Amino acid sequence: MNIDELEETENGTALTKRDLVTRISKETGITQLDVFSVIQKALDGIIDALDAGKHVEFREFGVFEIAERKARIGRNPNKPEDVVHIPVRKVVKFKPGKRMRQMLAGK
């Protein structure tokens, strides 16, 4: 997919799962229902792996991994005198692969 092709199917500024399903279905001739099912299973697999503490690596695309944010003290922007305790939490981090970095850099 290139930028011009994405613009044809994109809703606003985001590529949605629906856009991706439609695009793949048109290119492969596979029904949208089957494509949706495969994409959803892939996303569920990524979530399950991250939940199990594994990192998910797609060569040249990137790596998803779980990181832990430390507990910290924050402030309510509407009432700066109010101190808010922000607990430790897990977040998903993404590190782009070499090919993605090069493409985004315009190489």
Image: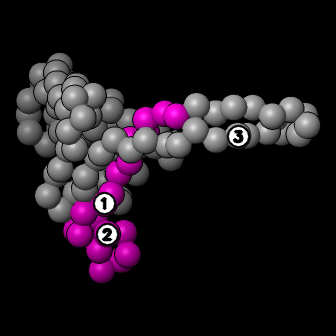
Say whether residue 32 is visible. no
Q: Is residue 93 left or right of residue 47?
A: right
Residues at marks 1 and 3, CA–CA distance in whole angstroms: 30 Å
Q: Which mark is residue 29?
A: none
Q: Which mark is residue 73?
A: 3
Residues in magenta, as a range: 88-107
Q: Earlier in the sequence, mark 1 or mark 2?
A: 1
What residue appears at the point 28 percent right and 46 percent down from the top-left corner? 64
- Quadrant of the image containing the C terminus: bottom left
Image-quadrant location for residue 75 = top right
What residue appears at the point 16 percent right and 51 percent down from the top-left corner? 58
Q: Nearer the viewer, residue 24 or 8?
A: 24
- Disc 1 target residue: 96
Residues at marks 1 and 2, CA–CA distance in whole angstroms: 6 Å
Q: How many marks?
A: 3
Helix, strand, or loop for circle 1?
Answer: strand
What residue appears at the point 22 percent right and 44 percent down from the top-left corner? 55
User: What type is the residue that disc 2 sits on?
Assistant: Arg
Helix, strand, or loop for circle 3?
Answer: strand
Q: Decide: is 36 above or below 68.
A: above
- Measured as percent of width and height from the top left, residue 73 is found at 70, 40
Asked if the residue at tag 2 contacts the one at tag 1, i.e. Cβ–Cβ closer than 8 Å, the answer is yes
- Disc 2 target residue: 101
